[in-house]
């Protein structure tokens, strides 16, 4: 079996069509989405802007959560931010779903949706599970790192490197683009220790300053989840489901 892995280190890279794309915004959007479904959530409607989120909430009603962030904090009148740890004590099955917008992750997810048969939500916590799903769709797999403000970031790059490492352990012949080789080198530079990589990451440092370090520690735990959120169409809208 031969696999081609295309890793794009930020959304400014020119995407190519792949059998499956995995979108990674490990700090914190894709970790948040995975946790949302672990806590009983039904559907997430990702949107690019806060204004779109407000408009959709008005149309859909009070049974829908507003979820997300700008500059790592919840916008005004949002029900919750982008903190997966915040969700751990919640059961979300009583809501119809969530409308979500983040600075980087939701935009990357929507971008990838035009370049694959399937788009999966990936993070450290579901790294093996998401790869198992993606590999069922073909032998050309893309990993899109959301980065931050269209720049490559250590956290997403290290997560992509972990995913490359997992595939190389399972598949004899893996072809990597330069992004994949860079991601693997970053992962190996930190001795395959995700928390150590995160400690060096600019975004993680900003989360620490906001008192959100528990999110960073939570996001660094590998293969804690079998949940694999995927992009789909829900009532004519792009949605994340399981």
Image (cartoon, helix red, strand yellow):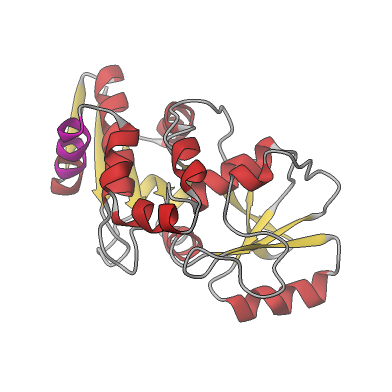
**Residue 152's quadrant in the figure?**
bottom left
Q: Residue 125 placed where, x, y %? A: 48, 33
Relative horizontal placement of residue 169, taking residue 130 as reference (left or right): left
Q: Nearer the viewer, residue 78 or 163?
A: 78
Q: Residue 21 placed where, x, y %? A: 40, 47
Above or below, 233 against 156 in this view is: below
Q: Nearer the viewer, residue 191 or 242?
A: 191
Q: Residue 90 placed where, x, y %? A: 76, 42
Magenta region, main secondary structure: helix
- Would you say residue 118 is visible in this rendering? no
Relative horizontal placement of residue 227, taking residue 182 as reference (left or right): right
Q: Residue at x 22, y 35 (%)?
A: 187
Relative horizontal placement of residue 100, taking residue 115 as reference (left or right): right
Q: Residue 118 placed where, x, y %? A: 49, 47
Above or below, 50 against 4 in this view is: below
Q: How many marks?
A: 0
Q: Which segment is the magenta one?
A: 182-190
**Residue 172's quadrant in the figure?**
top left
In magenta segment, residue 122: no
- Would you say residue 12 is visible in this rendering? yes
Task: Specify the quadrant that holds the N terminus.
Answer: top left
Above or below, 242 against 106 in this view is: above
In magenta segment, residue 184: yes
Q: Residue at x 30, y 26 (%)?
A: 167
Q: Nearer the viewer, residue 71 or 53?
A: 71
Task: Specify the quadrant that holds the C terminus.
Answer: top right
Relative horizontal placement of residue 206, taking residue 177 as reference (left or right): right
């Amino acid at each position: 079996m031969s696999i081609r892995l295309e890793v794009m280190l930020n959304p400014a890279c020119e995407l190519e069509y792949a059998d499956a794309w995995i979108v990674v915004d490990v700090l914190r959007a894709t970790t948040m989405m995975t946790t949302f479904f672990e806590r009983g959530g039904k559907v997430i409607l990702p949107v690019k802007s806060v204004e779109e989120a407000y408009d959709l909430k008005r149309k859909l009603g009070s049974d829908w959560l507003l979820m997300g962030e700008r500059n790592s904090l919840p916008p005004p009148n949002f029900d919750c931010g982008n903190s997966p740890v915040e969700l751990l004590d919640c059961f979300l099955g009583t809501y119809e779903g969530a409308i979500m917008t983040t600075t980087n992750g939701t935009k990357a997810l929507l971008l990838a949706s035009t370049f694959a048969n399937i788009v999966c939500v990936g993070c450290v916590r579901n790294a093996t599970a998401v790869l198992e799903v993606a590999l069922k769709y073909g032998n050309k797999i893309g990993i899109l790192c959301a980065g931050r403000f269209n720049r490559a970031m250590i956290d997403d790059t290290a997560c992509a490197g972990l995913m490359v490492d997992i595939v190389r352990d399972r598949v004899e012949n893996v072809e990597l683009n330069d992004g994949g080789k860079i991601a693997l080198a970053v992962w190996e530079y930190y001795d395959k220790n995700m928390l150590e990589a995160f400690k060096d990451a600019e975004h993680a440092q900003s989360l620490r300053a906001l008192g959100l370090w528990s999110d960073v520690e939570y996001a660094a735990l590998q293969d804690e989840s079998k949940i694999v959120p995927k992009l789909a169409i829900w009532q004519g809208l792009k949605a994340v489901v399981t």
